[in-house]
């Protein structure tokens, strides 16, 4: 019999797959002896079964009843007991944290009868009616599907009638009246009554949480965070404790270190006389956690102790939710806390120094994606002028965009290519699409743990929250500063998430200190705090990694930059850019040539130019390998546009003049070379095989460049790479030309030029016949851009815009296969080619030079597939170094997913 329910004391942190992150951590805290209100967890397995069949799996409801009975026995009262009701919360909790994306129902167990019992038992009628009001509202919207806005409107109306601005000022009788209004609303909207059976409330709330796994918000969040759709959520049922029982009660959120910078200390927000939800919602302004010391020194002291216990136990930054109920501290949640990229590196380094984790474990805890965020520019504060407002620096970085005041507008403008900043009083999960679309999020209310702050940090999005000086009017679509400046929708503002400031207009940006360090090696006192932990992680990664990291670069400048970033060579020097600009004329002549003499003339003119290109690159990469790829794209890409030419000729003719014969010849050539599907046409090795002299010219340019560099005392290491090979015969014929020219240049110059000749593997046929191809190839380099295109039959230039969003929506893939390697399909071809290639030629050097070479997840795959190197754009090199190091780590020290 499958077990669907676990009591808190039966679980632990290692069971997060089954109990969800929240449930597993509650169980862990229970085991550590921390004060956790008792409860139980319905498993993700039960949720998965429910989502498949639409019904509770066999045995689940009996198990829930049994665990509820145990909970009731422990509390000495029954769920919803009329004279003194036990109340429970029902919360979602998936394997991976999805803050605010699924449903929660609190105060389950209140009914028309038990609300009176609660009033008596708690000694506060107001509290009892407020709790009932919250339950009916949450249950009505979450479980019974009534539009949440209707409840809010009813509340607003009543506040208006009573002339109060805050619900705190409503009378008990008003709250009781609201309960009636809400119940009527539910009846009108659904034809059903709010259930008066506590057991039914519980059962329906659990199922509603299950169902919220597939809610739109949750699905969008998962897609963005690459969380699998089939995990399901666990449901935590826990005895309610109340932070809203008066001044000696309250709720808070705390971090064992600053999640923005990583600095040690106690950070968080506290709100007296409030439930946890009120803190996170940012509706009322919180006080810094440290002020709790003055309010309730006993609870503060206990909290500090528990936080220390948790950090030592988890060996990481923990975030915590707690409630104080009439002077008694309760721990409601903990988890390894989300953090900014800067904090991730800083904390990892500190924990090594504190002896809590090894250097390898520290490397596991930072990621290439985080490093990428640190490489972003920041504002030049000397040039930003006066700030419009200040708020809390909730998620660092600098962003500029037009102010917009709701999620839909953010999405609309961003889709049209505009950069926007989403400005709200506070955000709710409904704002998620707008947050995704925006460059930055700015709110006027809420602390560093408000929804806006938590979600933005998770996304690596710039965020300033709690900018109280701003009056945000979402209806009029503008905000007003304390000084009276009005900023209307569409006006450009600059948001500094590191300093917590907002500036008018587009503020100038300065490069990041991490980027400066990576480019120049420069370290100074001011930047050391940000730079040192990154330098340390990269050093660790470089020591650990097996994969080499090369660059895709085709100019001496890019090559030099790549080298500064730590590139160990060039894995792909594309030669096509060398055929553009002023040289295009020569390429035209080559294509139009109708005699060998004319073509050779054009090629001869191109030769010295190409040679100079290679001399520059080989010099910048002196002593390191430079893989030069022979010309790849179809030749008509170098000819003028068909329509332009045709129009020019037709206009000339319309004027009664004779068209320029050069234009006519060009148009003929364009027509002759037209291809319906040029990416699958006359390109790559095929070009070399049908255009006489082209390959010979390129190889001669490479060989002569090698000679020139050697004469200058350099150590050039050119490698020649043939693109788009599908059959070994293609490579063999091309290779003969290459070797002939290399021998010629060696003879002519008296300097031996030996360049390894290899091939790209970028067609499925090449991968499947790699054993044969390896006989002719001294190295392989996977062109995963073309390999993805040809494996899926996706046109790489068209499909992402055309239908990938529909594919992502339908869950056909979680990320574009052009971004992260498709392990099952393309990856399998890679594995076949590696194994058959090396079987035919032991020790065959193999790399990858498609875009995937700089993608963190793909780097891990290439490591495990046994490649020798990845090659990526210069800016991705530090990221690839870090990820290659992480991929090489062995062992599995527990580390929670954040
Ligand atoms: C590839 O196909 O992966 C590749 C690197 O070549 P290109 O992108 O130039 O076609
Ligand atoms: Mg290619």
Image (cartoon, grey):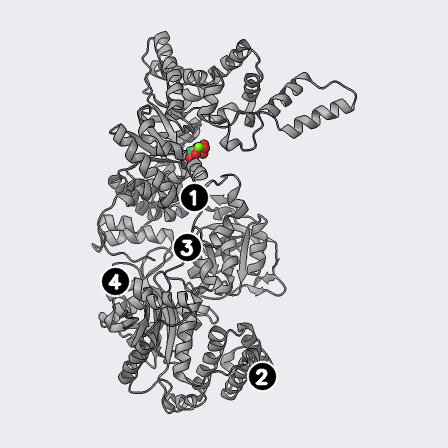
Instruction: Residue at 25%, 68% (x, y): give it.
Output: 28
Q: Which of the image's four quarters has the C terminus?
A: bottom left
Give the crowd class for mark 1: few <14, some 14-19, many >=20 residues within 10 Å. some
| Front one among 555 and 232 | 232
- Identify the mark nearer the N-term, 2 or 3: 2
Query: What secondary structure is marked by label 4?
Result: helix
Quadrant for residue 375, please give it: top left
Relative image position of residue 531 (x, y in whole percent): 34, 45
Q: CA distance from mark 4 to mark 1?
A: 32 Å
Instruction: Residue at 61%, 57% (x, y): give it.
Output: 489
The label on residue 162 is 2
Instruction: Residue at 57%, 13% (x, y): give it.
Output: 594
The label on residue 14 is 4
Please say if 297 is above or below 659.
below
Please say if 550 is above or below 280.
above
Reading the image, the residue beneath label 1 is 819
- Identify the mark nearer the N-term, 2 or 4: 4
Locate residue 203 relative to residue 15 in the image: left or right: right
Query: What secondary structure is marked by label 1?
Result: loop
Relative image position of residue 190 (x, y in whole percent): 54, 78
The label on residue 160 is none
Reading the image, the residue beneath label 3 is 225
- Identify the mark nearer the N-term, 1 or 2: 2
Q: CA distance from mark 4 to mark 3?
A: 22 Å
Locate residue 10 relative to residue 414 in the image: left or right: left
Task: Say if disc 4 is inside 8 Å of ligand 1.
Answer: no
């Amino acid at each position: 019999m499958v077990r669907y329910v676990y009591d808190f004391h039966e679980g632990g942190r290692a069971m997060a797959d089954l109990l969800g992150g929240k449930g597993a951590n509650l169980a862990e805290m229970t085991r550590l002896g921390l004060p956790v209100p008792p409860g139980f967890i319905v498993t993700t397995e039960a949720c998965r079964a429910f989502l498949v069949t639409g019904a509770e799996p066999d045995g689940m409801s009996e198990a829930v009843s049994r665990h509820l009975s145990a909970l009731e026995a422990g509390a000495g009262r029954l769920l919803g007991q009329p004279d003194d009701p036990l109340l429970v919360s029902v919360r979602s909790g998936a394997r991976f944290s999805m803050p605010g994306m699924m449903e929660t129902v609190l105060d389950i167990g209140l009914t028309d009868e038990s609300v009176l019992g609660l009033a008596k038992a708690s000694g506060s009628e107001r509290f009892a009616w407020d709790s009932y009001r919250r339950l009916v509202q949450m249950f009505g919207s979450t479980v019974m599907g009534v539009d949440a806005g209707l409840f809010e409107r009813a509340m607003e109306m009543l506040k208006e009638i009573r002339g109060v601005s805050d619900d705190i000022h409503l009378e008990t009788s008003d709250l009781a009246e609201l309960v009636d209004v809400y119940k009527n609303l539910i009846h009108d909207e659904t034809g059903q009554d709010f259930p008066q059976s506590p057991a039914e409330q519980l059962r329906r709330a659990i199922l509603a949480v299950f169902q919220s796994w597939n809610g739109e918000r949750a699905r969008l969040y998962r897609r963005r965070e690459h969380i699998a759709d089939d995990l399901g959520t666990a449901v935590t049922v826990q005895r309610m404790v109340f932070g809203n029982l008066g001044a000696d009660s309250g709720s808070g959120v705390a971090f064992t270190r600053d999640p923005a910078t990583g600095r040690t200390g106690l950070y968080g927000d506290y709100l007296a006389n409030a439930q946890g939800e009120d803190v996170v919602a940012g509706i009322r302004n919180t006080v810094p956690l440290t002020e709790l010391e003055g309010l309730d020194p006993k609870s503060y002291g206990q909290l500090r102790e528990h936080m220390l216990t948790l950090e030592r136990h988890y060996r990481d930054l923990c975030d915590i939710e707690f409630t104080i109920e009439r002077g008694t501290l309760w721990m409601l949640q903990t988890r390894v806390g989300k953090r900014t990229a800067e904090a991730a590196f800083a904390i990892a380094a500190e924990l090594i120094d504190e002896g809590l984790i090894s250097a390898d474990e520290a490397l596991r805890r930072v990621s290439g994606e985080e490093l990428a965020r640190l490489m972003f520019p920041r504002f030049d504060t000397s040039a930003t002028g006066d700030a419009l407002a200040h708020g809390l620096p909730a998620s660092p970085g600098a962003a500029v965009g037009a102010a917009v005041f709701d999620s839909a507008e953010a999405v609309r403008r961003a889709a049209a290519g505009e950069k926007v900043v989403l400005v709200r009083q506070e955000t709710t999960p409904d704002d998620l699409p707008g947050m995704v679309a925006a460059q930055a999020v700015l709110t006027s209310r809420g602390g560093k743990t408000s929804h806006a702050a938590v979600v933005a940090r998770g996304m690596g999005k710039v965020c300033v929250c709690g900018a109280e000086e701003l009056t945000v009017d979402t209806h009029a679509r503008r905000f007003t500063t304390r000084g009276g400046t009005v900023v209307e929708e569409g006006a450009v503002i600059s948001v500094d998430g590191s300093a917590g400031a907002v500036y008018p207009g587009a503020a100038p940006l300065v490069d990041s200190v991490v980027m400066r360090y990576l480019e120049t090696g420069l370290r100074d006192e001011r930047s050391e705090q940000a730079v040192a932990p990154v330098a340390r992680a990269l050093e660790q990664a470089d020591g650990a990694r097996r994969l080499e990291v090369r660059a895709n670069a085709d100019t001496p400048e890019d090559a030099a930059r790549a080298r500064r970033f730590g590139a160990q060579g060039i894995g792909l020097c594309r030669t096509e850019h060398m055929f553009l600009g002023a040289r295009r004329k020569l390429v035209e002549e080559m294509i139009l040539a109708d005699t060998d003499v004319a073509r050779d003339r054009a090629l001869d003119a191109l030769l010295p130019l190409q040679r100079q290109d290679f001399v520059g690159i080989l010099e910048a990469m002196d002593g390191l390998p430079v893989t030069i790829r022979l010309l790849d794209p179809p030749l008509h890409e170098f000819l003028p546009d068909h329509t332009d030419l045709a129009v020019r000729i037709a206009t000339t003719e319309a004027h009664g003049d004779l068209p320029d014969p050069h234009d006519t010849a060009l148009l003929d050539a364009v027509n002759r070379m037209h291809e319906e599907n040029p990416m699958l046409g006359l390109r790559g090795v095929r070009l070399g095989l049908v255009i006489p002299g082209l390959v010979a010219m390129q190889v001669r340019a490479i060989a002569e460049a090698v000679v020139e560099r050697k004469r200058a005392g350099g150590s050039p290491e050119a490698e020649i790479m043939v693109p788009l090979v599908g059959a070994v015969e293609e490579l063999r014929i091309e290779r003969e030309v290459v070797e002939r020219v290399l021998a010629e240049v060696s003879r002519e110059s008296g300097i031996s030029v030996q360049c390894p000749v290899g091939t790209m593997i970028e067609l499925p046929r090449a991968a499947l016949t790699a054993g044969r191809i390896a006989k002719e190839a001294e190295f392989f380099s996977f062109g995963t851009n073309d390999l993805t295109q040809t494996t899926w039959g996706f046109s790489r230039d068209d499909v992402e815009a055309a239908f990938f969003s529909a594919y992502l929506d339908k869950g056909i893939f979680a990320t574009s296969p052009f971004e992260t390697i498709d392990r099952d399909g393309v990856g399998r071809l890679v594995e076949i080619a590696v194994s058959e290639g090396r079987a035919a030629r032991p020790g065959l050097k193999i790399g990858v030079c498609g875009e995937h070479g700089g993608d963190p997840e793909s780097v891990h795959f290439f490591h495990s597939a046994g490649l020798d190197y990845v090659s990526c754009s210069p800016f991705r090199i530090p990221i690839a170094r870090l990820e290659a190091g992480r991929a090489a780590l062995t062992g599995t020290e527990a580390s929670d997913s954040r």
